[in-house]
Image (cartoon, rainbow, N blue to C red):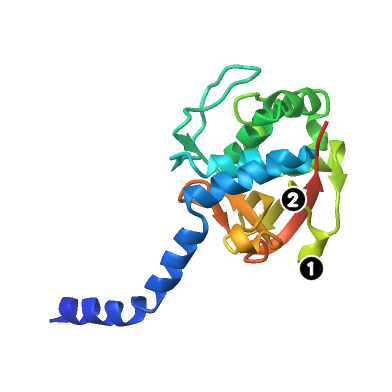
């Protein structure tokens, strides 16, 4: 009886969400992804190219996996069907010919104590250093532009990197992209918060902790 009641109650509360979820899926359809990528690439700007690479990542099937992997160096990557938020950033930058695994390692190795001392390792490790939000945040602040953290969407440009502080104490990272279709003037993000790379209207869904711009 209790199970049946729970099912009915769940149906009552979830039913209004179904049209919303369907609308979100329609907005971020493969067709809209491809349209946005094509438009961004036609502009030729670095930020647009990075955003296009990030959006392409949403077409890939990636199971969330934050495990430690031994990988090649430079140009190493964990299995392509695995990853977390940081891996999305690494892969998007690789698509525009920037190897953050190499660049982070080359900076962290001689300047190890300039980076956050919040991990178990005591030396630079090319297998994992670039796959940690805190290290990417420090790298972008050292080698790129540190920009204002605000709640005004016009302060964020396509291709910017944003870092959030989640309620559970963990940090999260994503790339600013345009919204889909008729909403392309809005600032959305591509990130992986557990269900694979996704294109979502989530720039201000979590407390922003960093805002960066990095290019060659």
Residue under pointer 2: 158
Tag 1 near tag 2, CB within 8 Å: no
Q: Is residue 58 above or below residue 8?
A: above
The first of marks 1 and 2 along the sequence is 1
Q: Who's the residue at 77% across and 68% down the image?
A: 151
Indicate the position of residue 192 as horizontal and vertical percent values: 54, 48
In the rendered picture of this protein, how many numbered marks are placed on residues?
2
Please tell me how crowded label 1 is: few (under 14), some (14-19), or many (20+) other residues with Cα within 10 Å: few
Q: Who's the residue at 71% across and 23% down the image?
A: 102
Q: Secondary structure at mark 1?
A: loop
Q: CA distance from mark 1 to mark 2?
A: 14 Å
- The answer to whether 169 appears left or right of 112 in the picture is left
- The answer to which of 187 and 67 lies nearer the viewer is 187
Indicate the position of residue 67 as horizontal and vertical percent values: 49, 36
Q: Which mark is residue 95?
A: none
- The answer to whether 165 appears left or right of 194 in the picture is right
Q: Secondary structure at mark 2?
A: loop
Tell me if I can see residue 208 in this picture.
yes
- The answer to which of 195 and 43 lies nearer the viewer is 43
Residue under pointer 1: 152
Q: Quadrant of the N terminus?
A: bottom left
Q: Who's the residue at 64% across and 54% down the image?
A: 189
Indicate the position of residue 171 as horizontal and vertical percent values: 64, 52
- The answer to whether 65 appears left or right of 185 in the picture is left
């Amino acid at each position: 009886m209790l199970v049946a009641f729970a099912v009915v109650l769940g149906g009552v509360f979830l039913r209004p969400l179904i049209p919303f979820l369907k609308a979100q899926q329609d907005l971020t359809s493969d067709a809209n992804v491809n349209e946005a990528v094509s438009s961004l690439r036609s502009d030729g700007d670095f930020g647009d190219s990075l955003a296009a690479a990030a959006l392409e990542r949403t077409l890939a099937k990636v199971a969330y996996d934050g495990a430690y992997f031994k990988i090649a160096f430079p140009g190493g990557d964990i299995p392509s069907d695995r990853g977390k938020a940081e891996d999305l950033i690494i892969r998007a930058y690789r698509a525009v010919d920037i190897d953050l695994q190499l660049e982070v390692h080359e900076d962290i190795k001689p300047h190890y104590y300039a980076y956050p001392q919040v991990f178990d390792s005591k030396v630079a490790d090319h297998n994992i250093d670039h796959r940690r939000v805190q290290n990417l945040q420090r790298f972008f602040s050292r080698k790129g532009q540190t920009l204002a953290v605000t709640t005004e969407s016009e302060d964020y440009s396509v291709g910017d990197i944003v870092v959030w502080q989640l309620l559970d104490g963990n940090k999260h990272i994503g790339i600013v992209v345009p919204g889909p279709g008729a909403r392309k003037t809005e600032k959305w993000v591509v990130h992986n918060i557990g269900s694979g790379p996704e294109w979502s209207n989530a720039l201000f869904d979590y407390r922003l902790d960093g805002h960066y711009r990095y290019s060659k």
